[in-house]
Amino acid sequence: MQSVHSGLLIDHCRFSDLKVLTMRRRKFLKHCTSILGSLYATILAVPALGFLFSTLKRGNQTDRTYRLTRLNDLEPGVPQRFTIIDQRVDAWTKYPPGPIGSVWLSKSKDGAVTAFSSTCPHLGCVIDYVAGDEEYFCPCHAATFQPDGAMVSGPQPRGMDELKTTIETIRGDQWVKVEYQKFETGIAEKYPIG
Amino acid sequence: MLPQKAQQWIDERTGYKNFLHAIFLLNFPTQRRSRWQFLWGGALVLMMLVEMVTGALLMTVYSPSEASAWGSVHYIETQVDLGWFVRGLHHYTAHMMIVAIIVHIFLVIISAGYRKPKEFIYWTSLLIGGVIIGLTITGNPLPWDQKGYWSYQIETGIAGTMPVIGSTLRSLVVGGSEFGNLTLTRLYTIHVIVLPVIALLLFTFHMALIRRERLRTAKIREAADDPEIDFQLDEDDPVKDEITQPYWPYQTTRTLVLTLILMGIIIIQLIVYPALKNQHVSVGHDGWEADLPASEIKLEAPADSYIPYVARPEWFVRFLFELRHLVPKELEVLVTAVLPGVILAVLFLVPFYEKVFGEKWGQRLAIFVYVGGLLIISGISWYGIQMERNAPDYALKRSQEIAYAARASWLASKNGVPPEGPDSLLRNDPKSMGPLIFARHCGICHTWNGHDGTGQYIMELKDGKRVKATPRASDLAGFATTKWLTEFLMNPRSPKFFGHVGAMKGGDAILNGDMNDWADSYVGPEGILTKDDIEAVAALVAREANHRDFKPLSEETVKRGVSVFSGIDFKDKSGKVVDFYGYCAQCHAMKAGDPEEEGGGAAPDFNGYGSEKWLTDFIRKPGAERFYGDKNIMPSFEESKLSKHDLNLLVKWMRGEWQRPEQEK
């Protein structure tokens, strides 16, 4: 009851001054809280975003060229599959050299070499070659391709992915070199991963 | 934020405002005016939030298995952007939380926060403290580096000494009797699920109790004249008339200030401490130089029970570890199981002190016990750390550990971690394994720069005192280098070479054998050979070893060396061609020094002397005809004694052949 009495004693003018002061103080503290709070959030958010997004760099491939076979060893008109052997780095683990993919090489009668990635552009299965039908065939969803890589039938959105080839002469022998790349699957455009 | 109308629309349908207020104490009346000393609890909550965010981030990369834990943490530290910052924040915030909970409980005690009806508030805060310590203990071994591995060995060892439940408890957290993949998966489960859930439940209970208590006791109406109360409460809410100063923004501002100060300290610590923590040791004792500067070593070497490491527990359990060494073995259980129990009981019973001693003296006793206990514990820990650092071989052991840590980090950055696991980085590295293999197999007789390869000395008991053992064979540091060979030829009887072999069975034939007679007759002031002659022939033989820093010889040196080795065209001091009967080819075969193909035979073959193949063959069978033959006194090291893998590492290490940082430039 005492406090009520003393409250009544405060004259009107002083009371409103107090009110204003309290309000200012409160506003000020609210601003402080939001500024300090955002500082706190920033200290957490900036490293968090950096951390999360930097791991996305993983798997970005570097184009690498592989020497696969002597040109003379390829039989004209018969595609042959070659395995790409390389070291694979997965985040912190470095694996010893092993298969990382394969390519189909075919030589035409006039000696021109074409290379196709054996990864199906539909969903990434490995494409076979059916010698009797002279067709590439993916066993997963029955995608078929012509020997020149063009679509025949099946669910695939594009033809087989052609890879760049070069011929290099080493000690008198002509060698076929292929620049191995992986492409996004399931889309009509041939778009390299990474 | 949302416009007023929308806020109201949602609130009418969910009552979220009151809900938020209840949960986060936003309109919570602080019992008195806000005070700086009531901030530590809030700061702990905000730090716990930091732990949860950074912990979740680390979980996206960390992989709990023996083969990948160390590699993934190393990847976080070196490859992930700001990974070092996130991991550092997680690590140092955990330690800061232990400090904060110690301060928080102290402030609770001095403000009598345990007094009726607040006993359960006090007890839950103790339990939360225990969970935080548990989180730190289970978090530290997760990188599976030497530090975490060995300190967890100690901590689970301490748990294992508890009577009755000890061994079951230990095997339950270890996942069997030995450390392995299951230890890590269990640690991980406890660290990321079990303890955080317990902590959250305790926290919820703690806050519910505080809310209940505050609502009951908030009687002060200081803020009754506060014109702007920006929250809505039901008319019949008991809080309505009891508002003093709301938690928000009065207390939140102060809590944030404290939290940010603590986080500032943490950030300074995580930037500065890695570079400072090894300042007290001079790195590089006895050939243990580190491949990386101290500031770049973020992890100790991968966990490996074969690689030496001095186990040190975390600072807050260090006192148990030290006390354990101070008491006799039979009383160990007192320290490891009874003492922690007593400490817990003393803390838990604080609310009842006042029943016995009255309010005033009860509280004084509580303060005395708390502060006194902390001082004693810190004293014991400090004493233990000082004792360890002042130990005579501390600098050597620590520089060995740092060298291993740096080596593993450097190899991992350079070559990547192999799929079989990070311990193979050091296990296949001559620089790291050579000294250990040498100490184990060769150090009993031979020395390396006087020590056993690792910087330690073989000790033996002599007249009841431990003294350095006398070696029994030559010192092999620099074996087959020009310098080593020159020194040998100048004085084969020196203790560095054949000096000690006389003590062994059959050793006299070597000590006082032909090589010694040769040196007596041809070297020295009266001898016909000059220092240059010796150096030339030494260089010629050292060329066979072809060490990595061997410089091509001048034609003149080769010619001179050949003349000493074969005796052909030998010139004396005056440059006159004379007959020389002390030529090496009489006994030693070496095509490069022997144009007449005399071929030696009576003494070790020098073709490829000191090369990888020569050393391998020699160590496998020193008594072979090519080497010492009948005179041999060195044991042979067959596959069963020394594996091919280890022998290869040993030989490579003796020849100084390993991947070096400077080669990469």
Image (cartoon, grey):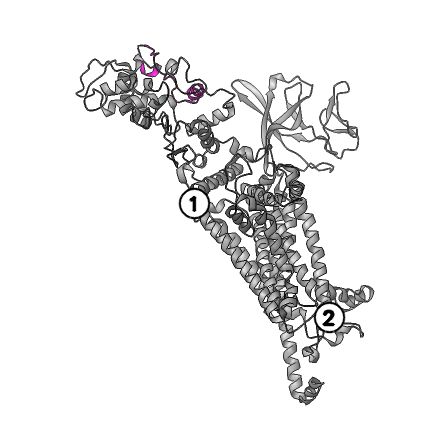
**On the image, numbered disc 1 is attached to which residue?**
B391
Q: Earlier in the sequence, mark 1 or mark 2?
A: 2
Q: Quadrant of residue A149?
A: top right
Crowd around label 1: few <14 · some 14–19 · many ≥20 (10 Å): few
User: The residue tagged with tag 1: helix, strand or loop?
Assistant: loop
Residue type at mark 1: give it. Ala
Q: Is residue B447 left or right of residue B567?
A: right
Between residue B477 and residue A29, name the one nearer to us. B477
Residue B376 part of the magenta-drawn span: no
* Quadrant of image for the N terminus of chain A: bottom right
Q: Position of residue B586 (x, y in %)?
A: 30, 12
User: Magenta segment range?
Assistant: B591-619
Residue B615 part of the magenta-drawn span: yes
Disc number placed over residue A137 in the picture, else none: none
Q: Looking at the image, how many numbered discs can be counted on the residues?
A: 2
Q: Residue at x 21, y 13 (%)?
A: B579
Q: Is residue B305 left or right of residue A108?
A: left
**On the image, numbered disc 2 is attached to which residue?**
B215
* Quadrant of image for the C terminus of chain A: top right
Between residue B208 and residue A186, name the one nearer to us. B208
Tag 2, which chain?
Answer: B
Q: Residue at x 57, y 65 (%)?
A: B367
